[in-house]
Image: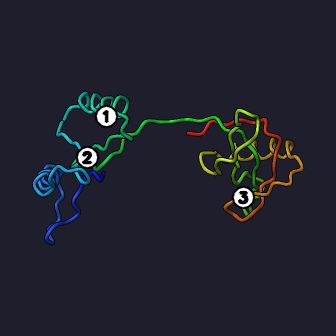
């Protein structure tokens, strides 16, 4: 199923305002099995936006809500999810950031106790956190036959999987 929500231009005419976009979409798209116009409504009420967010996202299972304001633009409102991950390895930065954490290799602990790599995390740290984390992780390095390479093409130093971080 494809749900349309915008028209960039049609017949060499740019359509800017939301009311005209949805009016034109409703006019040209017949409700069908494969293509529809995304469910939409016009409101100036924050309370109604909050109500629709709960209805469509929390109850209805939608990914989120797009709010369009002609003066300030579009906003996508999505729920925040977090997950606890174990730190499996790290890489050091290079050049002028040497001595600072570049990124982490994180994973999940399976029910049987085995580890599953999941992601690389390089953002969301202050410089102070990068310095402290690198210092802490260097003390946790363990020998490993497992090799994974960071985005900077440097092999991660693997650590004892004791440190847990929350990813958002």
Q: Position of residue 82 (x, y in %)?
A: 55, 35
Which mark, residue 68? 2
Asked whether disc 3 touches disc 1, contact meaning CB atoms under 8 Å apart, the reply is no
Which residue sits at x=21%, y=31%?
45
Which residue sits at x=74%, y=52%?
100
Q: Position of residue 83 (x, y in %)?
A: 59, 36
Tag 1 secondary structure = helix
Which mark, residue 97? 3
Does residue 57 appear to the left or right of 151 in the view shown? Answer: left
Tag 2 secondary structure = strand
Q: Give the class, few, some or many, for how many residues have Cα within 10 Å of label 1's Cα (few <14, many ≥20).
A: some
Q: Which image quadrant is residue 10 in?
A: bottom left
Q: Nearer the viewer, mark 1 or mark 2?
A: 1
Q: Give the class, few, some or many, for how many residues have Cα within 10 Å of label 2's Cα (few <14, many ≥20).
A: some
Which residue sits at x=23%, y=30%?
48
Render colour scheme: rainbow
Which residue sits at x=55%, y=39%?
168
Choose the circle earlier in sequence order: 3 or 2. 2
Choose the circle earlier in sequence order: 3 or 1. 1
Does residue 106 appear to the left or right of 46 in the view shown? Answer: right
Choose the circle earlier in sequence order: 1 or 2. 1
In depth, the one of 100 and 152 nearer the eye is 152
Q: Position of residue 60 (x, y in %)?
A: 33, 32
In depth, the one of 106 and 109 nearer the eye is 109
In depth, the one of 160 and 95 nearer the eye is 160
Q: CA distance from mark 1 to mark 2?
A: 16 Å
Q: CA distance from mark 3 to mark 1?
A: 45 Å
Q: Which image quadrant is residue 39 in?
A: top left
Does residue 126 appear to the left or right of 59 in the view shown? Answer: right
Which mark, residue 56? 1
């Amino acid at each position: 199923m494809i749900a349309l929500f915008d028209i960039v231009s049609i017949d060499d005419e740019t359509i800017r305002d939301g009311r005209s976009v949805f009016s034109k979409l409703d006019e040209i798209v017949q409700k069908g099995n494969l293509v529809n116009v995304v469910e939409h409504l016009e409101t100036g009420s924050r309370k109604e936006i909050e109500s629709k967010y709960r209805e469509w996202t929390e109850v209805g299972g939608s990914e989120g809500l797009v709010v369009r304001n002609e003066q300030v633009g579009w906003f996508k409102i999505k729920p925040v999810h977090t997950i606890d991950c174990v730190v499996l390895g790290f890489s050091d930065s290079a050049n002028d950031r040497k001595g600072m954490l570049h990124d982490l290799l994180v994973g999940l602990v399976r029910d049987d106790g085995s580890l599953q790599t999941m992601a690389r995390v390089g953002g969301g740290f202050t410089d102070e956190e990068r310095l402290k984390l690198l210092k802490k992780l260097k003390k946790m390095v363990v020998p490993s036959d497992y090799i994974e390479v960071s985005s900077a093409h440097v092999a991660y130093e693997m650590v004892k999987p004791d440190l847990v971080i929350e990813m958002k």
